[in-house]
Image (cartoon, grey):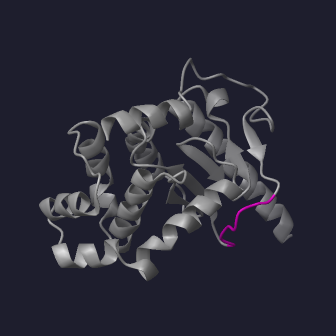
Amino acid sequence: MISLLRVVSGLLFVTFIGATAAYADGPQPGRDYTVLERPLASPKDQIEIIEFFSYGCPHCKEFHPVLDAWAATLPKDVTLRRVPVSFNRPPWARLSRLYFTLDALGEAPRLNSAVFAALHEERVAMNSDEAVVDWAVKKGLDRKKFNDMFTSFSMVQTLVPRADQEAASAGIRGVPSLVVDGKYLLNNEAAGSYAGLLSTTDKLIAKARAERKKKSK
């Protein structure tokens, strides 16, 4: 599992390097973000922020607490939705199923950080369904209830290809990646840091809010 994470990391992740660039003229399309040609479905009554991520991604692990702290301060008209991406890799698809299972059981807020820690700090090898179930049981979850959900076709397995399709529609090539209001894909390299990425996200939220207000008139 460790060697796989290293290989995939080199192929798929955008590394945040350098200082955050300060632009007085605000976020610019083509530089700070891309406008999706085909917007993703988005709630009518809220501005949705989508984080495309994977538990297997070391950068997602670093970003997770920063994003959680930021999300805790979001106004009522903004919501965060996480979408696990497998990039069609079976080990990552298993991790996507793990996220959807925890989410369905209402345990994702409690255990998201624990999954990242297990993979990247404790080096737990979640290289089989049984290993994942065993780990969940150690975290206090009922074995049968978790396993039934984790292996359920109708409740979990169908969500993985659906999530991958959504990521493909958004042009996601690395994680973590953020999309604002279904149409603005952040450019991680332009942001330069996690703080810079979220600063740009805040500005795009304001942009999306203004656009929605204008349309409602």
- Please tell me which residue is depicted at 43% across the width and 52% down the height of the picture: 92
- Please tell me which residue is depicted at 64% across the width and 51% down the height of the picture: 179
Residue 173 against residue 9 in the figure, above or below: below
- Please tell me which residue is depicted at 59% across the width and 25% down the height of the picture: 192
| Front one among 150 and 106 | 150
Residue 142 against residue 201 in the figure, above or below: below
Region in magenta:
38-44
Q: Is residue 37 visible?
A: yes
Q: Give coordinates of residue 23: x percent, y percent.
A: 73, 25
Q: Is residue 108 magenta?
A: no
Looking at the rendered image, the quarter that the C terminus falls into is bottom right
Horizontal side of 159 relative to 56 (left or right) equals right
Looking at the rendered image, the quarter that the N terminus falls into is top left
Q: Give coordinates of residue 154: x percent, y percent.
A: 45, 82
Q: Is residue 48 visible?
A: no
Horizontal side of 38 relative to 45 (left or right) equals right
Q: Is residue 42 magenta?
A: yes
Q: Give coordinates of residue 90: x percent, y percent.
A: 44, 55
| Front one among 35 and 209 | 35
| Quadrant in the rendering for residue 174 | top right
| Front one among 14 and 211 | 14
Horizontal side of 13 relative to 180 (left or right) equals left
- Please tell me which residue is depicted at 84% across the width and 62% down the height of the picture: 214
Q: Magenta-highlighted stretch: main secondary structure?
A: loop
| Front one among 84 and 2 | 2
| Quadrant in the rendering for residue 12 | top right
Q: Give coordinates of residue 51: x percent, y percent.
A: 54, 52
